[in-house]
Image: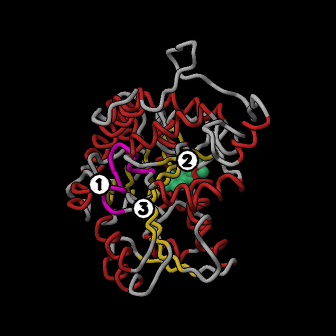
Amino acid sequence: MTDENWHSNTHLVHAGTARTSNNETSEALFMTSGFVYENAEQAAASFRNETDNFVYSRYGNPTTLMLEKRLAKLEGAEICRATGSGMAAVFSALACQLSAGDRIVASRALFGACYAILNKILPKWGVEVVFVSGGDENEWEQALSIPTKIVFLETPSNPLLQIIDLECVCALAKKAGACVIVDNVFATPLYQKPLELGADIVTYSATKHIDGQGRLLAGAVLGNAEFMTEQFLPFYRQTGPTISAFNAWIMLKSLETLSVRVERQTQNAAAIASELEMHKNVKSVFYPGLPSHPNYEIAKRQMSGSGSIVAFEINGGRENAFAFLNALRVHLISNNLGDAKSLVTHPASTTHQNLSDHERALIGIKEGHLRISSGLEHKDDLIADILQALSHVS
Ligand SMILES: *Cc1c(COP(=O)(O)O)cnc(C)c1O
């Protein structure tokens, strides 16, 4: 039983729970690939979609369904489908609606694998992809002046936390007839609701904050009933991007603590961003919660929290960036994010090393840029760690 009017923290603990006749407190884990029928007639009816029976775990599973209902409630979406990774979510949300000859407009500052799908894989299949600078309204307007099938974007972007005005881009996309897909990982479902701002589909890498404890890969696609049932579901059922029930169960338990974790991570990130901004060895700081962020006003309007990721440029380029990383004692060097452990990465040599120098320059990624994902450690220990590592930099 769930109440529409509950706050998201309450939905995170209760939404979607379907107890068995044992009345267990914690959600049950159904490790089963298939399901049996009482008789041949029931099997036949199930295959005609005339029953609520589960048929096969590639199509749906009772544990996975609890996760999907909880995520849908949190997002305010009609339907959610969970996937085996964030990339499975992004790829199936795109591929389920594309045909050769279609056109996509996307922001250029994207997670590396999303950029590769748009820049390398889809063009091979006859899909035209146009990239724009996400913060430039004129570029969006020009790119969307002709009919377009899909708009794909990420805000805040990886790694430099560029903010895209969702209401503005969604309105332009609507005029071009495009379906807007927002990769909402950095904001988390707690701090940004793209569907309320005009987007059609939201995707997550649940590997990040939603699990948030470094254990597994998972993803989710959320949208309205018409799109999810008519376009997404047939593709999902036949091509198999589904999540394992075991991972769905871990994710259900992760959701119970999501808001507590993200609130702490965000407090830590905000404190670190302010500290970095005052440091003489830091050239610039990128954090949506800082008034110095070029899109601070848009961030304030469309996000209810600033999130757990901070980027900054250290003076002295790659040499000092590496010296800083190697001096860290609490923060770990890792390209993951949203974890309980604080993680730092050097995008130019890791997550974005596949890009050409020209592509990196277009996004603005420099050799001195570092990205911090704040974890759950004590704020004072994190700040002390960053200050001592910055002191190793000349
Ligand atoms: C990590 C990430 C993905 C990909 O998710 P996986 O779970 O690693 O497949 C996609 N988009 C963004 C913004 C991400 O951070």
Q: Position of residue 371 (x, y in %)?
A: 44, 52
| Mark 1 / mark 2, whichever is N-terminal | 2
Q: Is residue 314 left or right of residue 28?
A: left
Whether tag 2 and tag 3 are in contact, CB under 8 A, the answer is no
Residue 282 showing in the rendered view: yes
Tell me the quarter of the picture where residue 386 sits: top left
- Which segment did they paint magenta? 185-198
Q: Which is more toward the observer, 99 or 253?
A: 99
Q: Residue at x 65, y 80 (%)?
A: 100
Cα–Cα span, label 1 and label 2:
29 Å
Q: Residues within 10 Å of mark 3 (few under 14, many from 20)?
A: many
Q: Is residue 285 above or below residue 392?
A: below
Whether tag 1 and tag 2 are in contact, CB under 8 A, the answer is no
Give the amino acid at mark 1.
Pro
Label 3 within 8 A of ligand 1 by Cβ:
no
**Mark on residue 153?**
none
**Mark on residue 81?**
2
Give the amino acid at mark 2.
Arg
Q: Residue at x 32, y 46 (%)?
A: 191
Report the quarter where the N terminus lies: top left
| Mark 3 / mark 1, whichever is N-terminal | 3
Cα–Cα span, label 2 and label 3:
14 Å
Cα–Cα span, label 3 and label 1:
24 Å
Residue holding disc 1: 288
Q: Position of residue 350 (x, y in %)?
A: 58, 57
Give the amino acid at mark 3.
Asp
Residue holding disc 3: 200
Q: Is residue 389 above or below residue 113?
A: above
| Mark 2 / mark 3, whichever is N-terminal | 2
